[in-house]
Amino acid sequence: PLDREELGRATWSTLHTMAAYYPEKPSNAMKEHARSFITALSQLYPCKYCAVDFQKNIELCPPKVDSRVDLSLWLCEQHNIVSKKLQKKPFNCTMEVLDKRWKVGPAS
Ligand code: FAD
C-alpha cells in the first residue's frame, strides 16, 4: 500500500500533468470533465482529513477550468495551500516553471 506521502506525490503528479496537457481552449464538455474530476477526487481521496480540507478549499476557490493556464495556476495554488499547512516551501506558480516541471518541452 502507498503511504500518505507517496499517495500525495502520485496524485499531484497526475493532476499537474493533466493540467499541463489540458486544452488551451477546452470545450464545455471538457470543462465539465475537469470540474467533475476534481470534485469527485475531493470526495474519494483516500486520506479522509486531506479530502475534507480539499473540499473546503475548493468551495472557497472553485476549480478554474477555462484554459490550460487557468487550470495549471489554480492547481499550483491549491498544492501550495496544502504545502503551507505542512510547512513546506511554496512552489513558484508561473507557467514557465510549471511547464518545465510538468510538460515535455518542444524538440530542439
Ligand atoms: P509534493 O508536495 O507531493 O509535490 C510533488 C512534486 O510536485 C514536488 O517535488 C515538486 O516538484 C512539485 N510541486 C510542489 N509544489 C507544487 C505546486 N504548487 N505546483 C506544481 N508542482 C508542485 N498530506 C498531509 O499530510 N496532509 C494533508 O492534509 C494533505 N492533503 C492533501 C490533499 C491533496 C488533494 C493531495 C493531492 C495531497 C495531500 N497531501 C496531504 C499530500 C501532500 O500534499 C504531499 O503530496 C506529501 O506530503 C508529499 O510531499 P512532497 O514534499 O514529497 O512533495
Image: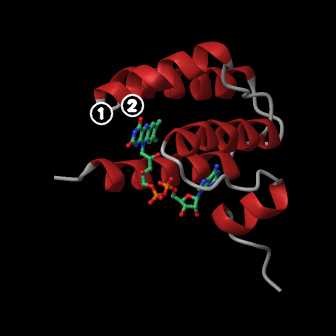
Snapshot quadrant of residue 42: top left
From this viewpoint, is residue 21 visible? no
Residue in front for this viewpoint, 104 or 63? 63
Vertical placement of residue 99 versus 52, above or below? below
Q: Quarter-wise, where is residue 24 in the image?
A: top right
Q: Name, please, the residue furthest toward the bottom.
A: 108
**Label 2 beta carbon less than 8 Å to ligand 1:** yes
Q: Residue 64 placed where, x, y %?
A: 73, 27
Q: Vertically, is 49 above or below 24? A: above
The residue labelled by disc 1 is 47
Which residue appears at 72% of the width and 28% of the height?
65
Placement of the C terminus among the 4 image quadrants: bottom right
Kindly identify the residue that appears in the image at 68 percent across and 64 percent down.
103
**Disc 1 beta carbon < 8 A from ligand 1?**
yes
> In the image, what residue type sits under mark 1?
Cys
The residue closer to the viewer here, 62 or 27, is: 62
Q: Mark 2 points at which residue?
A: 50
Percent of width and height locating residue 26: 76, 32
Q: Distance between the residues labelled 2 and 1?
A: 5 Å
Within 10 Å of disc 1 (Cα), the crowding (few <14, some 14-19, many 20+) is: few
Which scheme is used to colour this image of the protein? Answer: secondary structure
- Residue for point 65% across, 39% down: 75
Residue at the far front: name it: 87
Relative vertical location of residue 66 with respect to residue 103 in this rendering, above or below: above
Q: What residue type is labelled 2?
A: Cys
The residue depicted at 62 percent of the width and 36 percent of the height is 78
CB under 8 Å between discs 2 and 1: yes
- Label 1 sits on a secondary structure element that is loop
